[in-house]
Structure formats: structure tokens, C-alpha cells
Amino acid sequence: MNVREWIVIGSAGILALGGCSRKQSGGPPPVFSVQVVAVEARQQPLVETVPLVGSIAANETIEVKSETDGIVSEITFSEGQRVEKGQLLVVLDETKFATAVNEAEANFKLSQATYERSQQLFRDKLMSQQDFDQAVATFSMNHANLELRQRLLKDARVYAAFAGTVGARQISPGQVISRNSTLTWLVDLDTVKVEVKVPEKYLGQVQIGQPLEFNVAAYPGEKFTGEVYFISPQIDESTRTALVKARIPNPGAKLKGGMFASLDLRLQLRDTAVVIPEPAIVNNGDATMVFVVNNQTNAEIKMVKIGMRLAGKAEVLSGLAAGEKVIVEGVQKLRPGAPVRLAPASAAAPYLN
């Protein structure tokens, strides 16, 4: 049944009722008004919330390893300890490294003295070019060897690369380790990152600096807020998503790397949209309409085009202006042109949120 048929049938019914009333009473029929609940169509920013699942990552995290092979001589940290950048963590046995440095120093000093004498002899033309070049090469080689031995001695001590928290210890004193041996982990949780993959169609609504709210299972009911600082320049072709990262302050290290983050990505679709409560919408086949209260306090039908539907609300793209009163309760009893009376304002309160 289309709108015109509805209006004709409704009007015919009213005439029939009116005729019966006149026969019974001999006068004009009484006018009855229908009590309805109506609210104004509002103009407001339209925001869509997209539920996503991400994961928490530490700001920085590394496996702590030695740059050289050796025997663990001393462990200077405790598991879970807070350490500062440059703090000593592990000392390897330095005996062989120190001996190598002493040997390299002796060779270097000897070659340095030879080089200095060779310079004077070469200037006085008492040394051939070949012998002088040999002295220079020996001096340079011993100097490089000394620097290498000093670096190896330095590598026998492992320091914290940045401030953070030390993880579980993977070594014991006296243990022989290689360069590939993991000593412990170092994690910076002062700031954490939430990483989430955003569907391609929403990427245009994500901006650098945009706030991002999420929660984790460990702290139900508590909201954490971060700020988007990275949007991947590439789309994952298999999932049609892009990686988005937000940075979150983490005082007290409540958030840990690897936690799941449940978040609602807020996307502002339009700055000014006409929005009405969803119960006001009447569907009649392919037609979509609403009842409004006109200036004569009568019910009037308006054909509308609906856009985005959100929780309990709908966007009206055309057919209705902001400020018009749409009827949300009592629609079933209405006909076009029927007089209505508005229910108390308290009845409309649930539809105003």
C-alpha cells in the first residue's frame, strides 16, 4: 500500500465514521486528538564508532646480548629491576681481554718509537723510502690492533642501551656464552604503543594526532587514551587494512607488551547532519517516511531519505529540516491530518540522548 492509498483509505474511514456519528447525534462529530511523543530533529556532528582489536607494544624492547664470547664473571642486575641508560648489567671475565690489550699497547709503543726515529732518519736521508713506509705501516697496524683490543675489553661489559625494566635472567655466573646468547630482555614501558589494523574504507577518517580510546581485559571499565602518531603508507593486500599506531603514557607500567586492546575508533563523517530517533521511521514498501507535528498541531507525513544508521538514531539526508518535531511514539494510531497532543516532556527524555 503506498502513501496515497493510505491517505484515501484513512479519509474514507473518517467520513464513514463521521456519517455514523451524525446519524446518531444529529450534529458534527467530536474531534479526538491522539497523544504522541515527539522530539525535534537535531543538527549535530555525525560520528561513527568502529570496534577494533589491537595489541599493546612496549615503546622499546630488546634482547640483551654480549658482543663477544666469554665467561660470565658478574651479574649486576636483578630480575624486574628498573635500570637507567648506560647502567652496567653483566661483566664477562676480562683476564684474556686485558692481557691482549697489554700486549697490543707494548707493540704500539715500540712501533711508535720506531716511527718517530724513522721520521728523523728519513728527513736526514739516512733511510730509504721503502724502510720508512714499512715503519709507517707497522705503526698504523699496531695502532689499529690496540684499538681493537681495547674495544674487545670494553665489550666484556654489557650496559643498558636505554632506561627501562630488566626481564628474566637467562644466564648464571661462570656460564660460557657466545654472541648469540640472550642474557636478558630490556623493556621500556614508560610509554607504550597500541597497534591496530584499520580497514581501508576508514583510513580517510584517521589523522595524525587523533585521540584513540581503548580498554584492556586486565583493567575492566578503565579507559586509556592515546594519540595516533603513525599511519602506514601501505595497505596489506591480503586484509585490505593499514597499520595504525598510537602512543600512550604508561605511568606505573600498568600496560604490558602483548596485551589485547579493545578500542572504538571514532570517525566523524559529517559536521552538520540532521539526526532523528530511529523509532520515528515508518517503512511502507520502498517508501520511508516520518510523522511530524505541524504548526496546527496535526500529524503530517513527510517522505524522507535515510543515510547512516547509528545506535538508536538515523541520519536524514533529505525531506526533513532540523527543528521539526518528529513523532516517535503513537505512530500506529495516526492518520495524515489527525490532531495530536504532545505528551509531557519527560516522556521524550529517553530519545534526547
Image: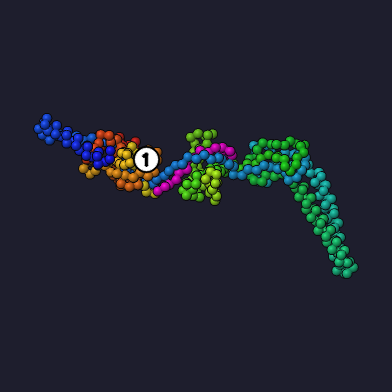
Position of 227 compared to 182: left or right? left
Task: List x then y, in percent, for residue 68.
Answer: 75, 45
Q: How many marks?
A: 1
Which stretch appears magenta?
253-270
In the rendered image, residue 268 lying in the magenta stretch gets the answer: yes
Which residue matches tag 1?
313
Task: List x then y, in percent, for residue 314.
Answer: 36, 41
Quarter where residue 16 is shown? top left
Q: Do we see residue 116 in this rendering? A: no
Residue type at mark 1: give it: Lys
Q: In the picture, which quadrant includes the C terminus? A: top left
Q: Do we see residue 207 in this rendering? A: yes
What SS does tag 1 mark?
strand
Q: Residue furthest right?
A: 126
Position of 17 compared to 232: left or right? left
| Residue depicted at 29% across the width and 35% down the height | 329
Depth check, front residue: 142 or 286? 286
Task: List x then y, in percent, for residue 89.
Answer: 70, 41
Quarter where residue 325 is shown? top left
| Residue depicted at 37% across the width and 38% down the height | 312
In the rendered image, residue 212 lying in the magenta stretch gets the answer: no
Depth check, front residue: 157 or 267? 267
Q: In the picture, which quadrant includes the N terminus? A: top left
| Residue depicted at 32% across the width and 39% down the height | 285
